[in-house]
Image (tube, rainbow, N blue to C red):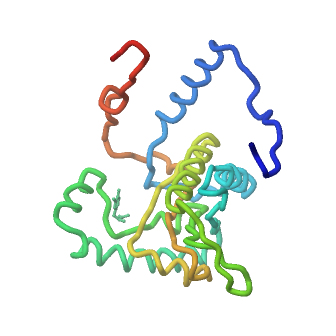
């Protein structure tokens, strides 16, 4: 059936169903407590913690296993300042007219504006690049598949890994983000996907009073005998 090399899969030891349910519920409880944070502490976070979380992100599934991602992990205050200044320039234009009235109204409950001090205050900025195609050192191109979906999955893994490690994060998407290629010296086959800010929440950090959908609004089971 398979022409390519395959190996036995032993990554998932069988668990009693009671423990499976306990783990599923524990993970749910963990992620229920995740919130996007915009008030960060400047308290340093050891690089090894971030490195482990980024490596967890690198285990995400991807189209044809092309792993079309690159993570630039920025702790250098000089680069963080450059990123802040460039991001705020784009954001100023967004809030001053590029965004539609409808979009600004949708953002109102979040209380965001063009000021992005967290880009300098938080200890780490993780810039996630989507590789739209592969390109080797001779310039030869390789086709990649489902790159956005793949990078989105890796980003989800990363956000969950950071939260699991006790770190807050913010999915920041200044638009457009081309300035990140320039500042970080990334090649033309890479498109900035997400700027993930991470660190500890500031003391007394507040988050918007928003709610999540009731599960009944987004889960619909169809089991044997239901139809
Ligand atoms: N990029 C802007 C605007 C913004 C857009 C969305 I969609 C958000 O969920 C939050 C903010 C900013 O970061 O302020």
Q: Where residue 118 sits: x, y (%)?
A: 48, 63
Residue at x-position 44% and y-position 62%: 172
Mark count: 0
**Left or right: where does residue 189 sit relative to residue 208?**
right
Within the image, what quadrant is residue 26 found in? top right
Q: Nearer the viewer, residue 166 or 145?
A: 145
Q: Residue 50: horizontal and vertical position, in percent?
A: 68, 55
Apparent side of residue 94 relative to residue 142 in the rendered image (left or right)? left
Indicate which quadrant contains ligand 1: bottom left
Comparing 56 with 8, the one in front is 8
Q: Quick check: 17 above or below 129? A: above
* Residue furthest to the bottom: 138
73 or 149, nearer to the observer: 149
Name the side, left or right, on which 103 lies relative to 21.
left
In the rendered image of this protein, does residue 179 appear above or below residue 206? below
Where does residue 136 sit, x and y in percent of width and height? 71, 79
Q: Quick check: 183 above or below 192?
A: below
The residue sitting at 79% across, 52% down in the picture is 4
Position of residue 209 measured from the top left corner of the image (x, y, whole percent) = 31, 41
Residue at (21% x, 75% y) in the render: 97
Quarter of the image with the N terminus in it: top right
Q: Residue at x 71, y 53 (%)?
A: 55
Residue closest to the far left: 101
- Quadrant (top left, top right, bottom left, bottom right) of the C terminus: top left
């Amino acid at each position: 059936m398979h022409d390519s090399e395959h190996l036995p899969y032993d990554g998932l030891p069988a668990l009693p169903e009671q423990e499976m349910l306990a783990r599923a519920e524990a993970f749910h409880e963990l992620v229920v407590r995740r919130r996007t944070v915009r008030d960060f502490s400047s308290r340093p976070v050891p690089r090894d913690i971030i490195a482990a979380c980024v490596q967890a992100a690198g285990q995400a599934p991807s189209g044809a296993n092309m792993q079309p991602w690159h993570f630039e992990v920025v702790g250098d205050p000089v680069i963080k300042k450059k990123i802040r200044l460039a991001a705020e320039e784009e954001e100023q234009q967004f809030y001053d007219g590029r965004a539609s009235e409808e979009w600004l109204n949708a953002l109102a409950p979040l209380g965001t504006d063009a000021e992005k001090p967290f880009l300098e205050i938080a200890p780490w900025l993780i810039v996630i690049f989507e590789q739209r195609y592969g390109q080797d050192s001779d310039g030869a191109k390789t086709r990649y598949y489902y790159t956005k979906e793949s990078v989105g999955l890796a980003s989800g893994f990363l956000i969950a890994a950071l939260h699991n490690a006790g770190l807050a994060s913010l999915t920041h998407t200044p638009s457009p983000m081309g300035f990140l290629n320039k500042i970080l010296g990334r090649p033309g086959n890479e498109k900035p996907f997400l700027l993930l800010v991470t660190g500890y929440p500031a003391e007394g950090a507040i988050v918007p009073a928003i709610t999540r959908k009731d599960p009944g609004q987004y889960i619909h089971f169809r089991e044997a005998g239901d139809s």
